Amino acid sequence: MAKKGGFFLGAVIGGTAAAVAALLLAPKSGKELRDDLANQADDFKDKATDYTDYAVQKGSELSAIAKDKASALGEQAGDLAGNVKDKTKGSLDKAQGVSDTVLESFKKQTEDLSDRFKKTAQDVNDQVDELSDIAEDTSDDIFIDVKESAKKAKETVSEGVVEAKEITKDVPEKLSEAKQDGKNAVKETVEDITEK
C-alpha cells in the first residue's frame, strides 16, 4: 500500500508540476493565466480535502476496532489470571489440610507403633495419592483454562481482522479513483493549454 501511495503522490505532484509548467509557458494574458492557476489550485485543494477526510475516517474506524479488541484481550487475560490464582490457592489449601492430617496421623500412630505400623503406611500412601490427585486435577483445570483462553484470544483477534478488512475494503477503489482524478486533471489542463 505504501508503494501505491508513493506512486500516487508522485503522479499527483508530477501532474501538477506539468500543468503549472504548461500554463506558465502558454501564450495567455496575465489575468487568464492567474484565473486558470487559481481554478486548478481550487480543484486540487478540494480533491485533497476529500481524500484527507476519507483517510481520517478510516483511521478512526480502525483505531476503534483496535481499542475494542485490546480491551477484550485484556479482560480475557485478567479472567485467566484470576482462574489460575483461585485454583492454585484452592489446591494449596487442600494440600495444607491433607498435610496437617498426615502430621496429626503420625503423632497418633507413634503411641501404638507395633499395631499400627502397617495401617500408618497405608494411610500415608492413601494421603500421598490424594495429594497427587489434587495436584493433577488442578494442573488439568489450569491447562484447560489456558487452552480456552488462547482459543478466545485467537477468536477475538480474528474478529478484529475481519472487521478491519470490512472497513478498508473500499480503500483500493478510492486509490484508483484518486489516480484517475489526477490523470484527468492533468489531461484537462493540457487540453486547455493546447486549445488556446
Image: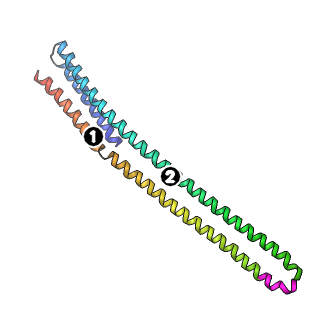
Element under disc 1: helix
Above or below for 4 versus 153: above
Q: Which secondary structure class fits the magenta region best?
A: helix
Q: Local crowd at mark 1 within 10 Å, few (<14), some, or many (≥20)?
A: some
- Which residue is painted at 78% across and 74% down in the image? 102
The x and y percentages for residue 157 are 44, 53
* Colouring of the image: rainbow
Above or below for 139 versus 176: below
The x and y percentages for residue 171 are 30, 43
- Which residue is painted at 46% across and 57% down in the image? 154
Q: Give 162 or 11, whichever is nearer the viewer.
A: 162
Estimate the spatial distance between the alpha carbons at disc 2 and disc 1, rounded to whole Å.
32 Å
Which residue of the protein is positioned furthest toward the left in this rendering?
A: 195
Residue with the mark numbered 2? 73
The x and y percentages for residue 53 are 33, 33
State which tag comes first along the sequence, 2 or 1. 2
Query: Which of the 4 image quadrants contains residue 141?
Result: bottom right
Above or below for 114 versus 82: below
Identify the amino acid type marked 2: Leu
Return the mark for residue 174.
1
Query: Which of the 4 image quadrants contains residue 56?
Result: top left
Asked if the stretch drawn in magenta spans residue 97, the answer is no
Answer yes or no: do the residues labelled 2 and 1 have beta carbons within 8 Å?
no
Q: Which residues are magenta?
A: 113-121
Q: Quadrant of the N terminus?
A: top left
Which residue of the protein is positioned furthest toward the top in this rendering?
A: 30
- Which residue is painted at 20% across and 30% down in the image? 185
Q: Disc count in the image? A: 2
Asked if the stretch drawn in magenta spans residue 116, the answer is yes
Q: Quadrant of the C terminus?
A: top left
Element under disc 2: helix
